[in-house]
Amino acid sequence: MEFLKVLLTSLLSVVALFLIAKILGHKQMAQLDFFDYITGITIGSIAAELATELEDPWKPLISMVVYGSVAVVLSLVTGKFPRSRKYINGTPTILMNDGNLYRKNFKKAKLDLSEFMALCRQQGYFDLSEIQSAVFEHNGKLSILPRSVKRPATPEDMNLTPAPACVYTELIMDGRILDGNLKRMGLDGNWLQKALREAGYRNAKEIFLGVCDQSHQLALYPLDP
């Protein structure tokens, strides 16, 4: 009889874990941020407890549902209000740009130089002079922009000198203007509105993503291409 109870609670645990994972989506497997990480670990631990809980299996089941629901709600909030992402998920941190390493940003990211070097080597960069910019993403991954002459297609082999590479800044996300980024670029709403009209758009609500480089060249991706 006890064997049958263990079998049934284990099956319940598997079904509950499968359903919650389907609701949360593939992000749990692909790109984990801090909250996704702790949520995945916690739900897995509760599922293991549920598999062996014979007297009151509904208690860990409710806990799994609560954790899964919170994760779904936060996902909806960050999708509806892009500005909340920096408080919930965190923001990217520039660790290196144009040959300069930013010590304060290393402390902010809680990353030491040995870990940084290891992340660079994992992406094939053993020489830091080959890197134009390195950004530590909120999910713990390092994004690297190589110097122009080090990119594939080897411009240096053709005795060419490409223009310096640059990092694009998001000005519009999900139809909303990111005022903070706009100010950091030395731009304002009037400039952005004029650029949108010249590109054939009435306002930012028609734009899914808008990014700008250091020369103020705007690239726009509409909501409905």
Image (tube, rainbow, N blue to C red):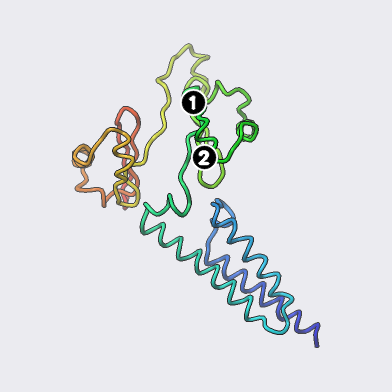
Q: Position of residue 35 (x, y in %)?
A: 54, 56
Q: Quadrant of residue 26?
A: bottom right
- Name the residue at 26% across, 51% down: 206
Image x and y of residue 157, in percent: 53, 14
Instruction: Please give the name of the residue rendered at 36% of the width and 41% of the height, measured from the top-left corner.
Output: 170
Residue type beneath disc 2: Lys
Determine whether the residue tagged by mark 1 lies in a helix, strand or loop. strand
Tag 2 or tag 1, which sits nearer the N-term?
A: 2
Question: Residue 194 versus residue 118: which sits nearer the camera?
Answer: 118
Question: Residue under circle 2?
Answer: 108
x and y percentages locating residue 221 in the rendered image? 33, 44
Left or right: 32 as drawn, with respect to 46: left
* Secondary structure beneath label 2: helix
Within-10-Å neighbours for mark 2: few <14, some 14–19, many 20+: few
Q: Residues within 10 Å of mark 1 (few under 14, many from 20)?
A: many
Q: Kindly indicate whether the residue at mark 2 contacts the one at mark 1 (C-beta within 8 angstroms).
A: no
Tell me which residue sits at (65%, 32%) in the image. 114
Q: Amino acid at mark 1?
A: Gln
Residue hosting label 1: 132
20 is higher (above) or lower (below) than 92: below
